[in-house]
Image (spheres, rainbow, N blue to C red):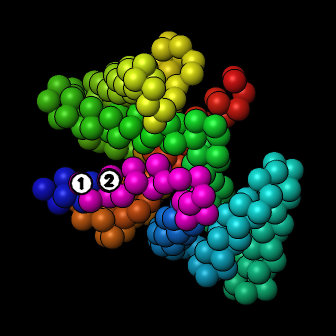
Amino acid sequence: MKRVLTAAVLAPIALVLVFLPPSWQPLFVAVVAVVSAMAAWEYLGLARGAGARAPRIAVLVSTLVLYAAWWEWQDAEKFLTIFGTLSVALLIYCTFASPIENVLPDSASSIFCLFYTGMTLIAIPALREKPNGPSLVLFLLFVVWAGDISAYYAGSKWGRHKLAPRLSPAKSWEGAVASIAGSMGIAALLFGLATLLQRQDIAVLSYPQDLHYWLITASVVNVAAQVGDLAESALKRSVGVKDSGTLLPGHGGILDRIDALLFAAPVLWCMQAMWL
């Protein structure tokens, strides 16, 4: 019940943010930046379980600067330059601030955190900047959510063959297949809804490519989401914890809730950038 109630509160908020007018894009970017910083805080907490003592404040500031840089320039070359500069800055900070025996794990966890919880989520505001941006972000969220729900219920009922028992014993191949099917199903529904609305001259959703493109995209994004979920499970298991935090009742921490998006969002952005 806690899981359902938490989702019932957060999902509408996310949808309202997605469909805010373009003039509200700074607020959207700011919200994603805050979520990214909160996930970074939780990741660094996990890293402490492995012996790293990364400077949390320095990493959070670097994460927020990364988003500010993207908002200011939105240029790939300048953005990568800023990311590299921040990475070197974190290395220098750890070189002088960490105990000598901790410089390597502290700097490594800091820089990886900036990439894992910071750079990856920038794909979400980047997607929203595209001509059909809100539709793309909605597609991303619904594909990930539908896959997660389908895997949970199908795996609970029919799961017999373990998918990755070392990483997540509850996940099954049956659930994984159902997850892909659920994502493809919601993609088809979104495409059909967009087509129906366009016939009524209601320009709320826009999926200009044909249906098979979106079905393929949904399946690829779903696989990325499942790998992202397993990757975060591996991080948690490596330090012997069940959840990354306790902020979201029934869901664990922020990182537990967005782990799939950390992989799925960049994949969708890359597919849009390379194939269209």
Q: Is 83 placed above or below 127 here? A: below
Classify mark 1: helix, strand or loop: helix
Name the one closer to the observer, 110 or 105: 110
Kindly identify which numbered label has been placed on residue 8.
1
Q: Quadrant of the N terminus?
A: bottom left
Work out whether residue 229 can be spotted.
yes
Query: Looking at the picture, which amino acid does disc 1 mark?
Result: Ala
| Residue 59 drawn at (x, y percent) | 64, 74
| Residue 258 drawn at (x, y percent) | 44, 53
- Asked if the residue under mark 1 is in contact with the one under mark 2, i.e. CB atoms within 8 Å, the reply is yes
Front label number (2 vs 1): 2
Q: Quadrant of the C terminus?
A: top right
- Based on the picture, tell me whether residue 14 belongs to the magenta stretch: yes
Q: Quadrant of residue 236?
A: bottom left
According to the image, label 2 marks what residue? 12
Prevailing SS of the magenta stretch: helix
How much space separates mark 2 and mark 1, taking CA atoms? 7 Å
Q: Quadrant of residue 112?
A: bottom right
- Residues drawn in magenta: 8-29
The residue at 37%/64% (across/down) is 253
Name the one closer to the observer, 147 or 245: 147
- Taking the image as shown, residue 44 lies to the left or right of residue 107, namely left
Q: Is 77 placed above or below 202 here? A: below
The residue at 19%/58% (across/down) is 5
